[in-house]
Amino acid sequence: MGDMKEETSEMVIGEHAIETVSVDKTTNNEFVSENTTTELEFSEKETFDEILSENKTVESVCEKETKEAVPEETAKETVTEKKLVVVFVLGGPGGGKSTQCAKIAKEVGYTHLSSGDLLRQTIKSDPVNGPMIEAMIKEGKSVPPDITMEILQKAIEESGNDKFILDGFPRDEEIRAAFESATKTEPELVLFFECSEEERERRILSRNQGRVDDNSESVRKRFRYFQEHTLPVVDYYKRKGLVLQIDAGRLEEEVFETLKSILGPSTTMQAEEAPITEELGKKISELGL
Ligand SMILES: Nc1ncnc2c1ncn2[C@@H]1O[C@H](COP(=O)(O)OP(=O)(O)OP(=O)(O)O)[C@@H](O)[C@H]1O
Ligand SMILES: O=c1ccn([C@@H]2O[C@H](COP(=O)(O)O)[C@@H](O)[C@H]2O)c(=O)[nH]1
């Protein structure tokens, strides 16, 4: 690393997990130091709770976010041109993502957006694209990314917020690339809800919300789409050190407790007990923790 001056800090997330972020003081870039893997082997099989109970290190690579004064001539920019703080929530259909996202978003002041919900609303409001969207949903296929992105960006802009929990998004590589390119945004964190197929199917078939895709035939197709197209997106973010796996097979309250320990206000108090660099402090406040 040459003669780079390095400052390392550890942050307590929840009660036990520790994130190690090093800051190259010569460039102010954050990087994960090479010796941080000793405590964490974050495999697909590990749930966040297992990490908590074993006091392991959670590695997270976050792009350095620079905050610059906004020049007057760009003051009229749209929200999607501004810096967004985004948490993606992925997991198989029926794992309880929407249930949890709605609750945790309220708790932490983020806006919860489910691209699936937005598309279902569009079926009712858009006579041109509506029938095509409904057909895609019934087949468990992805609506073309340009349509989904337009709807999502509109919802982002209309929310007036700059912090979002995006639920069930991005569900494939194509929409992941489209989102990152259109918004110039990488997620701060990707929560991966892990729950068995049997349990998820049980939950979906008793959901009773009148969804056209809550039937055995559509469920089979949606599960397959998840395996073939969504898991590669999870892997993509795992390689970037951004994924936290949640055991979503538990009771609703238990899952929520875990989410609060990751994103909730108590995290701030615990994090404040650890030494925090200026850069790390910025990151924490941008996450709203
Ligand atoms: N922990 C839980 N235990 C039992 N049932 C749950 C739990 N969490 C959610 N549910 C129920 O399971 C059903 C599916 O939950 P939810 O809609 O939140 O899942 P989802 O992951 O958003 O699904 P999809 O990807 O299909 O939109 C709902 O009826 C919900 O009330
Ligand atoms: O980004 C998205 C999200 C969803 N879809 C379609 O909607 C259904 C239902 O999605 P849920 O996340 O389960 O609510 C999904 O199976 C897709 O057909 C989409 O195309 N793009």
Image (spheres, rainbow, N blue to C red):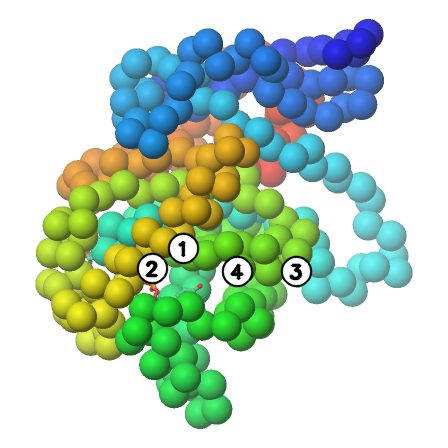
Q: Residues within 10 Å of mark 4 (few under 14, many from 20)?
A: many
Residue designated by label 3:
182
Q: Position of residue 29 (x, y in %)?
A: 73, 26
Q: Secondary structure at mark 1?
A: helix
Q: Secondary structure at mark 2?
A: helix
Q: Position of residue 173 (x, y in %)?
A: 50, 55
Q: Residues within 10 Å of mark 3 (few under 14, many from 20)?
A: few
Q: Is residue 93 left or right of residue 66?
A: left
Marks 1/4 in contact by CB < 8 Å: the verdict is no
Asked whether mark 3 lies closer than 8 Å to ligand 2, one says no
Marks 2/3 in contact by CB < 8 Å: the verdict is no
At 37% from the left edge and 69% from the top edge, which residue is drawn?
A: 141
Distance from label 4 to label 3 (Cα)?
A: 10 Å
Q: Nearer the viewer, mark 4 or mark 3?
A: 4
- Whichever of callouts 2 and 3 sits on the residue coming sooner in the sequence is 3
User: Residue extending furthest bottom?
Assistant: 127
Q: Which mark is residue 229?
A: 1
Residue designated by label 2:
225
Residue designated by label 4:
175
Asked whether mark 2 lies closer than 8 Å to ligand 2, one says yes
Q: Nearer the viewer, mark 4 or mark 2?
A: 2
Q: Quadrant of the N terminus?
A: top right
Task: Name the residue type under label 1.
Answer: His
